[in-house]
Amino acid sequence: MNIEAKNIIESGKAVLGIELGSTRIKAVLIDPADRPVAQGSFGWENRLVDGLWTYGIDEIWHGLQACYSDLRANVRSAYGVELKKLAAIGVSAMMHGYMAFDRNEQILVPFRTWRNTNTGPAAAELSKLFVYNIPLRWSISHLYQAILNGEDHVGKIDFLTTLAGYIHWQLTGEKVLGIGDASGMLPVDPDTKAYYATMVSSFDKLVSGYGFGWRLLDILPSIRLAGQDAGRLTEKGARLLDVSGNLEPGIPLCPPEGDAGTGMAATNAVKPRTGNVSAGTSSFSMIVLEKDLSRPYEMIDIVTTPDGSPVAMVHCNNCTSELNAWVGLFKEYQELIGVPVDMDELFGKLYNHALEGDADCGGLLSYNYVSGEPVTGFADGRPLFVRSANDRFTLANFMRAQLYASIGVLKIGNDILFNEEKVRVDRITGHGGLFRTKGVGQRVLAAALNTPISVMETAGEGGAWGIALLAGYMVWNRDNLNLADYLDKVVFAGNTGTSVSPLKEDVAGFDSYIEAYKAGFPIEAEAVKCKR
């Protein structure tokens, strides 16, 4: 038993980070040296209901409570103590989407997640109005689409927030949001650290004829920066989180953030000319900018770091889901012939074997569009594997094509940043499930972006660790360092991880693959049309 960790937990000096991801809710407890000392998790999946991707309110609380219960069990098993006090708590969740509540705190329509692509008309009109790229998944797009659709609930809205903002509100009573997550509800001015006043005014004027009883700022959460106090755990909040009744109220909470912001914290990528790539169920890259882009791009979202610096974000709805499904098929084959299955070993063998394939995948193509993919213009998707009779159809090429497909859309967006806008980066760090097999995901991403990619051992802790770091920053930053310096000097102490540089043949192969990939879009479009 780690006596030091036991004493820290028992004395209430540990910090808790919770992140509600797309397929897993995870809790991480860290000590004052930012080291994970306990964790809990709970698996869940979104559902397609009436054509929209959602998680039910009951599912949200069941999952959160089960995750926290798993954390409590881990603490009791490892240290023989009950979790009662904490130095701070941070909550993070998948970004954006639409959660609208009435004055009685009742949700008006089921939670509409980032995965929904039904907001095209609204996003296009708002992008033109604001002269700013407004993505399909942003909250303002969902709100305006509901207005365009004539949905009755809109006039009853009292509060509009994200999943992280909702959980934080219920735990603390505070209607606030971290600036990174807020910048995906409505664009944020990096100079004022507030929602763009001109956009607020333009939107209110746009919808003034509908006669709603609210103006936009009335229903949006207030913005908080990293390090600021965002409220305290109430008695009600403590009971919601810990159904055992052991957790004590009064614990401070940091501003709730989206998974992009926590990914930046977990990879020490909040300083200009740094960036990170998160690759799991979805993928996104975050490049902290030195200056504004020359113009808006439909493929590139402008959001902020948790302390308000502008970030160019390329967000892809699909990443490893289709890749994982194919590995699952190979698992079934092993089970069919009576071979014991170790999933880590299976992933490792298939991933490493992919590196033995042709750099251009032998002509094979894969489209991993489990859902729509806005970056490439698909409102709906259909997973698709394509080959011609003369392509080199081998297992290595097949697996390499699946790996390339998982970050193909990410490459298309980042080619604009690096080739057209000439954005420069000193370091890009990868994290997420794609990088679990050592070296493979790094090499593929390095080829896609034609830049060195670093992976840290701690990056495997993910966004729950990232929001725990932000909560720790709020209570442990005794020297009043800015966030970038705190992460650089205190948390990471100069550690930049293990770097893999791109190989020329891999870069040329990926470039060849992506040209064929783009040329094959009409095939994917026809598959979507014929979708059952």
Image (spheres, rainbow, N blue to C red):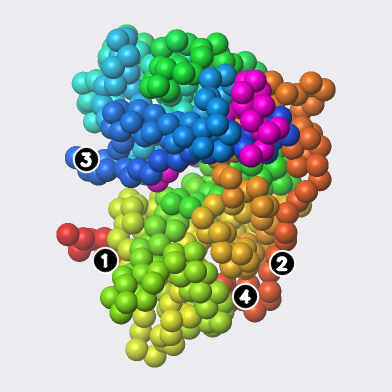
- Is 358 situated left or right of 55 in this image? right
Confirm or deny contact between disc 2 and disc 4 (CB under 8 A): no
**Three-letter code, disc 2:** Ser
Mark closest to the chain's N terminus, 2 or 1: 2
**Three-letter code, disc 1:** Glu
Residue with the mark numbered 4: 506
Q: Residue at x 78, y 39 (%)?
A: 488
> In which quadrant will I find the N terminus?
top right
Q: Residue at x 32, y 72 (%)?
A: 335
Residue with the mark numbered 3: 49
In the depicted structure, whether residue 285 falls above or below residue 387: above
Q: Which mark is residue 501?
A: 2
Residue 2 on the magenta span: yes
In the depicted structure, whether residue 92 falls above or below residue 203: below
Q: Position of residue 188 (x, y in %)?
A: 57, 27
**Can you tell which of label 1 and label 4 is closer to the viewer?**
4
Q: Position of residue 438 (x, y in %)?
A: 61, 64
In the depicted structure, whether residue 204 falls above or below residue 59: above
Mark closest to the chain's N terminus, 2 or 4: 2
Secondary element under disc 2, as helix, strand or loop, is loop
Mark closest to the chain's N terminus, 1 or 3: 3
Secondary element under disc 3, as helix, strand or loop, is strand
- Is 200 situated left or right of 500 in this image? left
Residues shaded magenta:
1-27
Q: CA distance from mark 1 to mark 3?
A: 24 Å
